[in-house]
Amino acid sequence: MKSCLVSQLSHYLTLDRTSLEGLAKLERDERSYKKRERVFSIGEENRFLYIVKSGWLYSYIDLADNRRSIVSVFQPGDLIGYSEVAFERYATNLSTSEQSVLCPFPKHELSDIFEQHPALAALFFAIASRDQIIMIDRMRAISSMSSREKLVYFLLDMSARMLMTHSIPEKGMMIPMSQQEIGDMLGLTNVTVSRELTALQVDGLIEKEGAHIRLMDISALIRMCEFKDRYNKIDTTWLPK
């Protein structure tokens, strides 16, 4: 299977042979997980980072009265754990939305990347910076937007991420997250998510068939929530050669 991590990184930077070999070492092991299986929990010893080879996952924290807040969603090619790499124990839970395959590697192996592949290490740093801005964008969406605008923001965000590494099928992007999971990410109930999806279909802005969602009028959707695509391009002019 082609490395999704390589596909994502190659979107921003042409990788040389030694960089590809360094990344291949990080993906040498694989572990399979069932749908809605927990990978790690808050408080567990933080020894590994994970590369998503296939499937969707999400990190979350538990709230009062049995609620939860989904912090991040991970797709193929994403690196899980670098936001917590400075801590000895995990600060979030990680669970799968669907059957998934992860490539775990000890976090101390990042030192090899920093020592032997400085451009690659700098790119990881740049992507971490990108993700911080995306988190701020999502906080703004959750705190100030209507339920419809929040859902539109989520759909555009997922679409922009997918387009980095592959084209979206004619029938639309496949989102394996349940309506409850989407709601837990946006601060909405699953009933509200269902209602707004139906309303967007009625208005002709999306088409939905099962887990597939097709965005019909992207320009109108972008205007609705002032979405900014943070994925397509980042500044790499400062990276070491």
Image (tube, helix red, strand yellow):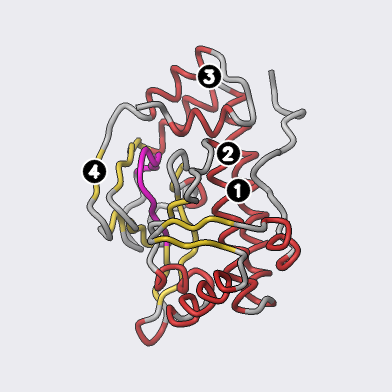
Residue at image mark 4: 32
The image position of residue 64, as x and y in percent, is 41, 84
Task: Kindly indicate whether the residue at mark 3 contacts the one at mark 4 (C-beta within 8 angstroms).
Answer: no
Q: Secondary structure at mark 1?
A: helix
Relative to 4, does residue 212 appear above or below in the rendering? below
Q: Earlier in the sequence, mark 4 or mark 1?
A: 4
Query: Which range is magenta?
Result: 48-59
Q: Earlier in the sequence, mark 3 or mark 2?
A: 3
Mark 1 is on which residue type? Ala
Q: CA distance from mark 1 to mark 2?
A: 7 Å
**Which quadrant: the C terminus?**
top right
Relative to 226, does residue 19 appear above or below in the rendering? above
Residue at image mark 2: 164
Q: Farthest top residue?
A: 17
Task: Kindly indicate whether the residue at mark 2 contacts the one at mark 1 (C-beta within 8 angstroms).
Answer: yes
Q: Residue at x 67, y 76 (%)?
A: 145
Quarter of the rendering containing residue 119: top right
Q: Residues within 10 Å of mark 1 (few under 14, many from 20)?
A: some
Residue at image mark 3: 116
Q: Earlier in the sequence, mark 3 or mark 1?
A: 3
Q: CA distance from mark 4 to mark 3?
A: 30 Å
Residue at image mark 1: 160
Q: Earlier in the sequence, mark 4 or mark 3?
A: 4
The image position of residue 96, as x and y in percent, is 32, 56
Task: Kindly indicate whether the residue at mark 2 contacts the one at mark 3 (C-beta within 8 angstroms).
Answer: no
Q: Earlier in the sequence, mark 2 or mark 4?
A: 4
